[in-house]
Amino acid sequence: MASKTLEGIKSIENFQIEDKRLFLRLDLNVPLDESGRITDDTRILAAMPTIRYAIDKGAKIILASHFGRPKGKPGDREKYSLEPVAAYLNDALKKEIILVEEPAANATKQLLSGLKPSQIIMLENLRFDPGEEKNDREFAQKLAAFTDIYINDAFGASHRAHASIVALPELVEKHGLGFLMRKEIEMLDRVRLNPEAPFVAVLGGAKVSDKIEVIEVLMDKVDTLIIGGAMAYTFLAAQNISTGKSLVEKDKVRFAGELLERAKARKKKLLLPVDHKITRDIKDTASLTITENAAIPEGWMGVDIGPKTIALYAQELARAKTVFWNGPMGVFETPEFAEGTFAVAQLITESSAITVVGGGDSAAAAHASGLADKFSHISTGGGASLEFLQGEALPGIGALKPIKRSDKEMLIESTGEVIEEPKRQ
Ligand code: ADP
Ligand code: MG
């Protein structure tokens, strides 16, 4: 399906990459445990199709990513090194990955001149250079100096105007997107531009305040809004239902009340939990009980949705044709409180709908449910997927549009063919 967002944007397949220095901006920002082992390789796996394609086509490959949030403190260069990712790729691809300490140094260019087709170098964490987060043109120029073709496949970083995301493609004329970016944009566009009805959005997670914009945008598009997780308690509080000591955002109760009114006025279904799993304390799993109804007694806190709620949500999800899910239904990191989240994951994947998951913790929950391969798409971008869904133009996508020229100006491509470049929107 052609996506409007992608109009005028080239992809890796449009370029002749053999023997060319190909800069692959990836999102290899994976979590590590204390001993430096990768605990979740989802993002690396998601980047693999583009990496393998580049190898197959015989490009000279430069892999680049950010990694965590180094602040230039002592020890940061070890703590935020891409070394574990380089080692992982070494094993997975059975290819030597040369990790370059100083991406912006001249040495990189020299190293590349000796590189053979299908060989790979990896630049150290781009954020080690303060120019990266400042979208600094000079830093980007140093990267552009050894780049023939630039490909962005880092959806999870494309909501940030950083040098390797924005300034660099603006300097490299041959630029486009990779396979992961294409899939992310196409799938999220299916949800945000013309979702097939009934469109059910399932929202949960910790805070209403994190999700205000998403809720507002989705409210207009959905047929049904299902709310769970801690977010639900603020909505219950708006209806004067007791919430005990559950997480409630007092300053958002009014907003929640207004949303309930708005949903009613627009004849949208907005479903809230009708029972809960509650405990005395978030650590006290032994005290877990189920409420009779939506009210939570004094001294207790909600940690998950209850069985009646699951049955209620099941009815809506069974007939959905489009589902967007963001936010777990409970504190799913604790196995005793994960039932509601995993039940919803199962209901979503059992439906005949296009099913898209957005949000970092939601993606983790989808994977933990064991049903990851049953969703149509699990976005690798936490913040990026939500911003994109809200209709914000992501800087990283905008930077992939053709370089702006005056209306009449023609661009003569290397083929000698004269084509008119569309203006960047
Ligand atoms: P995402 O990263 O997918 O956008 P959020 O960050 O909004 O999701 O929310 C995820 C967090 O919400 C999880 O860490 C989960 O433990 C928490 N959460 C869900 N339900 C509850 C609850 N009832 N009480 C406290 N925290 C909750
Ligand atoms: Mg989160």
Image (cartoon, rainbow, N blue to C red):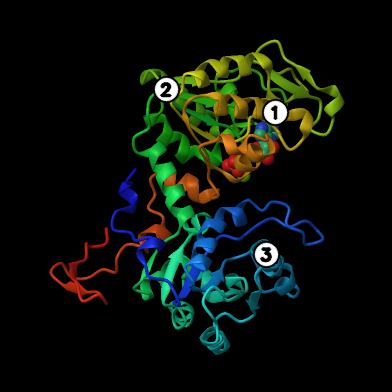
The disc placed on residue 85 is 3
* Ligand 2 visible in quadrant: top right
Label 1 CB sits under 8 Å from any ligand 1 atom? yes
Measuring 39% from the left and 49% from the top, which residue is drawn there? 392
The disc placed on residue 263 is 2
- How far from the left and from the top, in percent, is residue 92? 67, 61
The quadrant in which the C terminus is found is bottom left
- How far from the left and from the top, in percent, is residue 165? 46, 65
- The amino acid sitting under disc 2 is Ala
User: Is the residue marked by circle 1 packed among few (<14), some (14-19), or many (20+) residues within 10 Å?
Assistant: many
Q: Which residue is mark 1?
A: 246
Quarter of the image holding residue 122? Answer: bottom right
Residue 206 visible to the viewer: no
The correct choice, above or below, for 226 with respect to 188 in the image is above
Measuring 45% from the left and 59% from the top, which residue is drawn there? 178
- How far from the left and from the top, in percent, is residue 294? 64, 15
Per the image, label 1 sits on a secondary structure element best described as: loop
Counting every numbered tag in the picture gives: 3
* Cβ–Cβ under 8 Å for marks 1 and 3: no
The correct choice, above or below, for 147 with respect to 318 in the image is below
Residue 406 visible to the viewer: yes
The correct choice, above or below, for 233 with respect to 193 in the image is above
Per the image, label 2 sits on a secondary structure element best described as: helix
Looking at the image, tell me whether mark 2 or mark 3 is earlier in sequence order.
3
User: Is the residue marked by circle 3 packed among few (<14), some (14-19), or many (20+) residues within 10 Å?
Assistant: many
Quarter of the image holding residue 89? Answer: bottom right
- How far from the left and from the top, in percent, is residue 207? 60, 37
Front-most of 146 and 89?
89
Measuring 37% from the left and 53% from the top, which residue is drawn there? 393
